[in-house]
Image (cartoon, grey):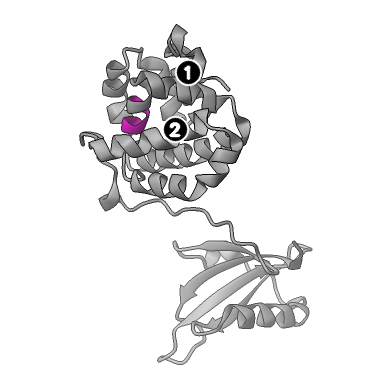
Amino acid sequence: MRHFATISVLLFTAYVNCAPSIFCDDVVYRTPSGEIFVIDIEAESSFSEVISKINSDIEIQRSANWINPEETLVRNEYFLDFMERPKAEGKKAISPKGNMRNFSATLLESEKKKISQVVETLGNASLVTIAKEKSSLEKAGKAVDHVHPLKFLAFIFSTERLKAAIHNLNGRSWVWDKFFKGLKMGLEEEASHNNLLPHIKKFSSSLKIDSKALYLNAEQQRWKEFVNILFKEIPRSENSGRYDM
């Protein structure tokens, strides 16, 4: 990815050098040599117009006096790197607080069925079968996206057939990585709303394991270690080998 110019830009709003009816933005830009200059940009300017003005103004302003940004900055500051054709990351936004998942909610039979479908298929089915079931698996996953991640894990690790399947799934890196990515996202979302740590003790108690290590890893958001504790402390039963592929 190529930069238009090696420029770090600081945007903040101010009524400076503008007609009274126009709301302006001050753009503070820093050149590769470390010089800092200021230009006024109308609030209605498009992104490309801002970039164009910065680029055309760089050479003109090189001989201007140094402007100390600390003297003019206000609280709302945004540091931006202007790049050419940036790729969309597609990162899922953190759900608003009003949409927090309910840890106290009882799992419905339909939800248990969907969770079982996903975990057993990914853990026990052949690659060909998983590929064929991709659409239905994604649909089932979306249907239980509202389930609290601790509730999701508690159901899996307290159900023998799912416990066996999740252990198998953990050994299939080509499937596990994507599954864990979704699980991690749910854990991060609830942790960001303080909707995870308060439930660790009850969660661990339901699985009859110690809560201290789980709490510590959740507090530090070490999700891989958090889940690995479950695999270590809650092994599948001895007669579950029939699920191995």
Q: Amino acid at mark 1?
A: Phe
| Rendering coords of residue 70 (x, y %) | 55, 61
Mark closest to the chain's N terminus, 2 or 1: 2
| Rendering coords of residue 81 (x, y %) | 65, 63
How far is mark 2 from mark 1, CA to CA?
A: 15 Å
| Rendering coords of residue 59 (x, y %) | 78, 79
| Rendering coords of residue 213 (x, y %) | 42, 17
Residue 152 falls inside the magenta stretch: yes
Task: State which region is magenta.
Answer: 150-154
Q: Residues within 10 Å of mark 2 (few under 14, many from 20)?
A: many
Q: Name the magenta segment's main secondary structure.
A: helix
Q: Amino acid at mark 2?
A: Val
Q: Looking at the image, is 211 positioned above or below residue 96?
A: above
The secondary element bearing badge 2 is classed as helix
Q: Residues within 10 Å of mark 1 (few under 14, many from 20)?
A: some
Identify the residue under disc 2: 119
- In the image, farthest residue toward the top: 238
